[in-house]
Amino acid sequence: MLSRSDILSKNELKKVRVPVPAMGGDVYVSEMSAERRDQWEQHLIGAKAKGPKIINGRAMLIVFTVVDDKGNPLFAEADIPAIGKLGAQALDPIVEQAQKLNGLGADIDDIKKN
């Protein structure tokens, strides 16, 4: 049985280096912490609640999962509109890895429905 200290000591998040050929380099994509995942979900829910506005789901996922080599977020929420204007196909490797690392897919569909 895991103890409290066993659980709380497991705070290292998985991080994967992802080639982004269309942009000529690599990025790190990280697993989200529970806190970061909650922020991401609230951002999606809040955007949907504001009405029939386009939700930049891919851009939001990139903001919440792309990190530097030390695990610090590379982007801020203010970057969502700019990232949303980038080519979707170029961003696909990042988005796919972020979904895989964070067990997303069905969750995204559920959030969109609700």
Image: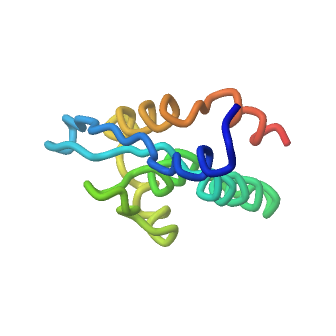
Image position of 44 (left or right of 66): right
Quarter occupied by residue 36 = bottom right
The quadrant in which the N terminus is found is: top right
**Can you give x and y, in whole percent of width and height, for residue 101 in the image?**
48, 33
**Can you give x and y, in whole percent of width and height, for residue 53 in the image?**
70, 57
Which residue is pictured at 37% across the width and 62% down the height? 72
Quarter occupied by residue 19 = top left
Image position of 90 (left or right of 82): left
Which residue is pictured at 68% across the width and 49% down the height? 4
In the rendered image, the vertical position of residue 47 relative to residue 6, given as above or below: below
Quarter occupied by residue 69 = bottom left
Residue closest to the eye, 22 or 72: 72
**Can you give x and y, in whole percent of width and height, for residue 44 in the image?**
69, 53
Residue closest to the eye, 62 or 67: 67
Residue closest to the eye, 3 or 89: 3
Q: How is the image coloured?
A: rainbow
**Can you give x and y, in whole percent of width and height, for residue 77 in the image?**
51, 67
